[in-house]
């Protein structure tokens, strides 16, 4: 797996959302949910309808899953932005039942297979290139973008570490792409 970067520029995030929404509400929802929850792509693609909406069709307040990589339970709220994307996607998708994968592959022969990692990579990478992002972008970019922007909004690094299930703040800082230049800007811009 190549080392990929977060998407640092919010304007590029918004531009990617527009491109994705214009081509596929599913892809827009995948991107939006991914950058707003910090799940690994394997866990995002492993979501079922029942993980995000109740039997009456209402978006749940929280997602509770067992992470594929760690086996740990992850329980977190669904943000308003992510809930809106889920509603739009499921309205466009039409009929479904609770035990279907949330993100369906259009390439599946039976029509009910989940989107595959390589398909998600292709979608995310193409949208990133379309908005002029030159950094290495991949499916892990969604999770890194979540962590990076949480840090930029002054969320304590130990909270981000816990959200991402990392072993130390140092690992989290490296993971989300905080560079020495980012750290230097804090000192240079403080000017007390």
Image (cartoon, helix red, strand yellow):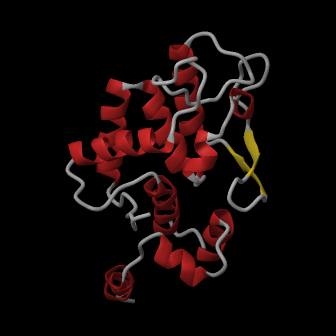
Q: Is residue 173 left or right of residue 130?
A: right
Q: Is residue 168 left or right of residue 146?
A: right
Residue at image coords 31%, 87%: 188
Residue at image coords 27%, 62%: 135
Front one among 112 and 32? 112
Residue 4 to residue 130: above or below: below
Q: Quadrant of the N terminus?
A: bottom left
Front one among 191 and 56? 56
Residue 6 to residue 172: above or below: above
State the count of labels.
0
Residue most toward the front?
A: 109
Q: Quadrant of the C terminus?
A: bottom left
**Residue 108: where, in percent of width, then height?**
51, 23
**Residue 44: where, in percent of width, then height?**
60, 44
Residue most toward the top?
A: 95
Write down the quadrant of residue 102 in the picture: top right
Residue at image coords 39%, 84%: 183
Residue at image coords 52%, 34%: 115
**Residue 24: where, in percent of width, then height?**
39, 25
Residue 48 to residue 177: above or below: above
Residue 120 to residue 60: above or below: below
**Residue 55: where, in percent of width, then height?**
79, 19
């Amino acid at each position: 797996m190549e080392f990929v970067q977060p998407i640092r520029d919010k304007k590029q995030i918004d531009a990617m959302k527009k491109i994705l929404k214009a081509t596929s509400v599913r892809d827009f929802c995948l991107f939006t949910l991914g950058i707003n929850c910090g799940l690994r792509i394997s866990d995002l693609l492993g979501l079922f309808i029942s993980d995000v909406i109740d039997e009456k069709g209402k978006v749940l307040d929280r997602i509770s899953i067992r992470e594929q990589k760690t086996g740990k339970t992850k329980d977190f709220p669904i943000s308003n932005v992510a809930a809106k994307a889920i509603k739009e996607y499921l309205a466009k998708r039409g009929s479904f039942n609770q035990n279907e994968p949330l993100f369906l592959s259009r390439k599946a022969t039976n029509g009910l297979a989940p989107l595959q990692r390589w398909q998600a990579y292709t979608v995310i990478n193409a949208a990133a290139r379309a908005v002029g992002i030159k950094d290495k972008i991949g499916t892990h970019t969604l999770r890194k973008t979540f962590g990076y922007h949480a840090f930029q909004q002054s969320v304590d690094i130990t909270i981000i570490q816990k959200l991402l299930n990392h072993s130390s703040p140092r690992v989290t800082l490296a993971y989300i792409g905080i560079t020495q230049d980012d750290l230097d800007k804090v000192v240079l811009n403080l000017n007390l």
